[in-house]
Image (spheres, grey):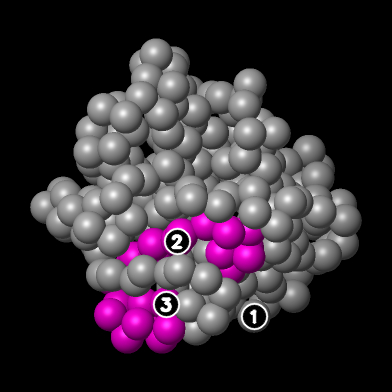
Amino acid sequence: MFQPNLFKDKNIFITGGGSGIGYVMAKQFLDLGANVAIASRKQDRIDKASAELRAFGNCYGTTLDIREEDESARVADEIKKEFGSLDILINNAGGQFPSAAKDITPNGWRAVINNNLNGTFLVTQTMANQFFIPQKSGNIINIIAEIYRGFPGMAHTGAARAGVDNLTKTLSIEWITYGIRVNAIAPGIIKSSGLEQYPEQFLKSIYDRIPMKRLGTMEEVGWLAVFLASPMASFITGETVYVDGGQRLWGDAWEIK
Ligand SMILES: NC(=O)c1ccc[n+]([C@@H]2O[C@H](COP(=O)([O-])OP(=O)(O)OC[C@H]3O[C@@H](n4cnc5c(N)ncnc54)[C@H](OP(=O)(O)O)[C@@H]3O)[C@@H](O)[C@H]2O)c1
């Protein structure tokens, strides 16, 4: 579908690239000739993933907690040493847990906001200041979630992702003079390792609530990232694209009791 060397000599950093959607994206970009760095908190996960991904191209793996500013700065230095520069940042790391809003503890609320909103901003600001702004070029893709009509059942992540959705628009304009494009991808329910923590009852009930009557695949999210990162999307910025089988327009993933 895409030219084999579409991303030749391009350096890409994918947070949370050691599993699920981030891992599949890393493989897709490697297959298209990119150098890919991946990072997340668990050293064993990153070591295993980067070793596997090296079968497909030049992959560098390192640890990172996106919530820690100093760690982002350290990873930027490592990327500089490994690749020399950075062209594309994909903010994919994140996580949440299902809970009715009335039951979310203050700590649970803070944890999800800190990870998905604050962590995404810290990595983005660091990579922009270290690479994109000085070099006057860059491409940022934020993976958020299907938040079109709020996020009943996960208010904390809905609020955090709405923050990143808005940040996407703001940064796309603030940084347009630096030649940086900023877009977001809002996945619906995607068959990935991230779904393993959800109750079986929920997983059984969701098919009927997705107009396409199936889950999305990790590849379907990844191909959109490939498109948005490519010159084919060179006039697209500040946009959030939904990959959700029509779910945002019809039905709710969470049953209202
Ligand atoms: N699957 C879906 O249906 C779906 C739908 C909408 C949105 N999403 C979002 O898409 C992204 C990828 O999800 P996935 O389904 O592929 O799930 P996943 O396998 O759980 O991926 C999440 C990744 O983020 C990393 N991570 C989490 N917190 C981090 C932190 N503080 N610092 C660095 N890395 C961190 C995790 O690695 P470590 O544990 O090693 O840190 C993991 O590799 C997530 O943001 C998820 O919320 C998924």
Image location (x, y in percent) of residue 138? 42, 33
Q: Which residue is mark 1?
A: 200
Can residue 27 be seen by looking at this rendering?
yes
Q: Secondary structure at mark 3?
A: helix
Image location (x, y in percent) of residue 22? 51, 63
**Whole-number angstrom distance, CA of label 3 to CA of label 1:** 31 Å
Which residues fall within the magenta stretch? 27-51
The quarter of the image holding the C terminus is: bottom right
Judging depth in this view, the residue of 33 and 99 nearest the camera is: 33
Q: Residue 37: within the magenta?
A: yes
Name the residue located 73 percent from the left edge and 41 percent from the top edge. Answer: 248
Q: Which residue is mark 3?
A: 50
**Whole-number angstrom distance, CA of label 2 to CA of label 3:** 9 Å
Assess disc 3: are there few (<14), some (14-19) or many (≥20) residues with their C-alpha within 10 Å of its C-alpha: many
Task: Choose the circle earlier in sequence order: 2 or 1.
Answer: 2
Assess disc 2: are there few (<14), some (14-19) or many (≥20) residues with their C-alpha within 10 Å of its C-alpha: many
Task: Choose the circle earlier in sequence order: 2 or 3.
Answer: 2
Assess disc 1: are there few (<14), some (14-19) or many (≥20) residues with their C-alpha within 10 Å of its C-alpha: few
Task: Choose the circle earlier in sequence order: 3 or 1.
Answer: 3
